[in-house]
Each structure stands twice: as C-alpha cells, then as structure tokens.
Amino acid sequence: DQQVKQNSPSLSVQEGRISILNCDYTNSMFDYFLWYKKYPAEGPTFLISISSIKDKNEDGRFTVFLNKSAKHLSLHIVPSQPGDSAVYFCAASEGVGFQKLVFGTGTRLLVSP
Amino acid sequence: DTAVSQTPKYLVTQMGNDKSIKCEQNLGHDTMYWYKQDSKKFLKIMFSYNNKELIINETVPNRFSPKSPDKAHLNLHINSLELGDSAVYFCASSQVGGLGYTFGSGTRLTVV
C-alpha cells in the first residue's frame, strides 16, 4: 500500500530547460511534504518542503507546488543544470514532528549539456 | 565532521549470520531513524527513537533489534540474516520542528 507515488521512474531534460517532477499521495492526513535529492552512494539530502497551508514554496531554482484537492505535488527546477542529475524523492508526513516520513520510489533526473 | 555517519559502508555476509550496523550523529538531534531501501528503491521506515526511547516500530521482523545507548547513537543488530535482508540501510536524524531528516550515506548489506 504505497501512500506516496512517483509514477515516472526517470526524466531527461536538456540543460537550461525546466524539469518537472511529479508526486501523488493518497493519505489525506499528510500535511507536510518534502523533496529529497540523492546522488549515488550517498544518503538523500533535503531540498525543499511545503506545508499544506501553502500551495507554493520557492527556493532559488527550486519551486514546489501543492494541489491538495488533487493530492498532487510537483517540483520545478529552472533552469536545470547537469549537477541536478540525481534521484529525487518525494516524502510526506502527518504533522511537522517528522516522526515518520513516507517516501515515494524516486525519479531519476538526467540533465544533459 | 560528518553529521550522520554509519559503519560499515558495505557488508557482505552469509545467510544465518548475525551482524550490526552502527550510526552516530553529531547534530544534537533528539530523534534517530533506520530506513531500508529495497531492490525496488522503496525507502521505508523501520524504527524511530526519540531520546533513546523507541517510538516507531514498523512491523519489522524481531530478528532486527535497534539499540540506542544515548541520543547520539542508534545501532541496528540483525540476527539470522536472510537473503531478503539484502538492501541499503540508511540511518537518519531529525529535530522536532526542524527541516526534515539528515541522512547517513547508507550501508549496503548483501546476504549470500
């Protein structure tokens, strides 16, 4: 029973263009959402988060959009850079206590020069 | 000066053996976790400890026993290893109200 889903296992984008990574969730109790980035042989690193009271959060080239009615969030990277090539995980939790993050299966992003 | 460090990075062992993975964090966080990433790349929580107290145990077989001697350490001991235990195990820590987890670099366990 996968409560957080990333249906695209991979995405290829050219340098300078926009990357859009998508995530869907089923648990309506989730109210805090995070994106993590993972390079090979390293642990995931926190990228950006959004609370359910917002529909958009921006941090430099990274923007996360939340559509609560559709139970959908997306991560936009503009402009994409080759160093952004990594696996991106969407995660969700009930509350901000971070007692339990539920992760999606990840989307591998490849940004080509 | 690594924030969350786990050892060993790689572990290859035979079925039936007992092994341990160690984790330490120097961030002063009060909560630590073990996550398992299986062959399908699914990252799933196993255990969570807050100030040395077990708060989450996600239906993990009792062959897996976490131990937290203090809030900076959370070790994972696995008895009678099985082929299906092969995975990457990530330790993580967090502070309530902080911005998500800080993960270690993972331990790739291979059971042969």
Image (cartoon, rainbow, N blue to C red):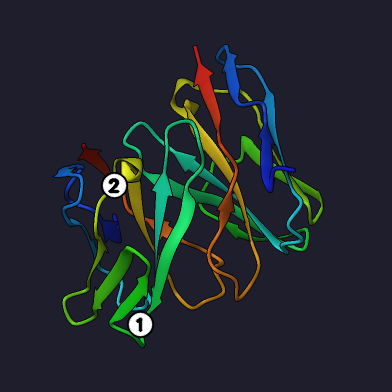
- Three-letter amino acid code of the residue under disc 2: Gln
Q: Which image quadrant: the C terminus of chain A?
A: top left
Label 1 lies in what chain? A
Q: Which class describes the residues within 10 Å of circle 2: few (<14), some (14-19), or many (20+)? A: many
- At a point 36% along the width and 43% down the height, the residue shown is B42
Residue closer to the observer: A100 or A11:
A11
Residue on which the image places disc 1: A52
For residue A100, which numbered disc appears in the image? Answer: none
- Judge left or right: residue A59 versus residue B89: left
Indicate which label's residue lies in the foreground, 1 or 2: 2
Residues at discs 1 and 2 both on one chain? yes
Q: Which image quadrant: the N terminus of chain A?
A: bottom left
Residue on which the image places disc 2: A81
Label 2 secondary element: loop
State the image coordinates of residue B21 (x, y, percent, origin top left).
68, 32
State the image coordinates of residue B36 (x, y, percent, origin top left).
49, 41
- Judge left or right: residue B32 versus residue A42: right
